[in-house]
Amino acid sequence: MNKTPPVIVVRGSDICFLGILRSCRAANIPVIAITFTWPGAPVWHSELSECLGERYEIANPFTDADLAASQLADIFAALFNQWQQRLMVLPSSDTNYMFLLDHYERFANSICLMGDRAFDQPRYDVIHKASCAELLLQRAPEFVPITLRCSSVTDIDSAVDNMLYPAVYKPAVKDYGQTFYTKHNGNKAIEVAGPDELRAALLKEIEDGFDLVVQEKIFFDSVYDEIPFYLYADAKGEIRMAANGIKELIDPFPFGTAIILRMAWFPELLEAAKQVVEALQYRGILMIEFVKDKKDGRWKVIEVNPRHWLFNGFYQRQGLNFTECLYKDMYGDASKDTGSNMMTPATAIQAKLKDSVHFDLQAVASNWFDDPQHHSLTEFIKRIDEFDGNISSAFYDLADPAPGRQRLETMAEKFGWDNKDLKKLIDLLV
């Protein structure tokens, strides 16, 4: 038996999942994958990955939560008995993270999750946006915009009366089916102009079963004022690895998902990130969403995400393997990554990271071409080529080629492109 303990990776987002798998392979970390699917699910390109390895299939947690939880409990218990230790489980989406937290008592003796300084307790207080804001308000209030919980009709009056306008509201936690996003056409938040609009919206959303937070809208001037900060923090709160991104394209705009992300580094945010980590007493991989408030020029935290982010594989390919940092921290081999040796784009690998831009190519194509008759491959290539720097794609990776090939073939079929002409697109990718 391999003496190196594996990590367990649960598939949710195929892009995020593949990024974790490839990061593990690059660091020689054994992986056990947990997957599930459903009728009408998208093509799982990860099925073709050379990194997939040992895998267990479970029921869909959204439609068969009890069965899925029972199956996971059995799998985790068997793996615990095999390895004689609790293995780290890495969710690849908020939805399967919430499933793990909701059933954590059943799994607690067999697994561990990131977040707690001893990897011993779940951090529901960090993933829940209202309680996370309360933690930050207690210990780092300068970073917190007005953020109010609204989980029942009795909370509506207080939220409406104590909010600054315009405001946004969003789900405090995700459900297993991303119902809020589906209802709102992929938007992660909804903007309201004033109290009457907010009151009506909250009443309808709560009737539909959503637990919400309401937050003052932070105005900013450019993409350089809305910066995701990706980091790994150890048991002492030291940041061992850090990087930023610039969201070149968000779909749907402005409250959707970044589908074009440029590698970046804003060293002036490092101290703020350290304060957030300390306020949350957090250990593990973390994303902090910083926005520079146009009103006072100060950085504010509008959201925290305590797991791997969508394009984590892009960062690994550029030399920042956050999953490896986690694994070294778990097993005591990360001392060289602390203090002045912290890995950032500005230190060990600056040249390689310069002007690196990452695309979810199919999402970008769908965003740019509304009319199916105008899905010109030539035009698509021209628009991508307008971006300066090294271009990479979410699925295309020469070290694990099959998922990317399948993704490109799927695009060619969807947009009516000649497969032979796809070489022109591939030639743009690194």
Image (tube, rainbow, N blue to C red):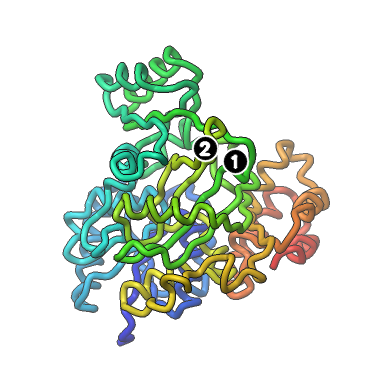
Q: Which label number is shown at residue 97?
A: none
The reply, left or right, for residue 243 in relation to residue 205 is right
Residue at 22%, 78% (x, y): give it.
82
Q: Which mark is residue 251?
A: 1
The picture places residue 177, in percent across and down from the top left corner, at 39, 42
- Of residues 365 and 430, the one nearer the viewer is 430
Instruction: Please name the residue shown 57% across and 73% down the image.
Output: 348
Which residue is located at x 48 percent, y 56 percent? Answer: 270
Q: Is residue 357 above or below residue 190?
A: below
Q: Are marks 1 and 2 in contact (CB under 8 Å)?
A: yes
Horizontal arrangement in the rendering, residue 365 relative to residue 74 (left or right)? right
Q: Is residue 143 above or below residue 358?
A: above
| Residue ID at (57%, 70%) | 347
Taking depth in this image into account, of 5 and 148 the one nearest to the observer is: 148
Q: Is residue 153 left or right of residue 337?
A: left
Residue 125, image x and y in percent? 27, 46
Q: In which quarter of the image is the C terminus?
A: bottom right
Which x, y percent locates residue 370?
Answer: 71, 37
**Residue 86 place in picture, x, y as percent:** 23, 70
Q: Mark 2 points at which residue?
A: 186
Report the amino acid beneath label 2: Gly
In this rendering, is residue 67 above or below 130? below
SS state under label 2 = loop
Who is closer to the viewer here, 114 or 362? 114
Q: Which of 41/257 is in front? A: 257
Q: Which amino acid does label 1 sit on?
A: Asp
Q: Is residue 122 visible?
A: yes
CA gap between label 1 and label 2 equals 8 Å
Q: Residue 295 occupies which quadrant of the picture?
A: top right
Residue 417 visible in the shown view: no
Q: Earlier in the sequence, mark 1 or mark 2?
A: 2
Q: Quadrant of the N terminus?
A: bottom left
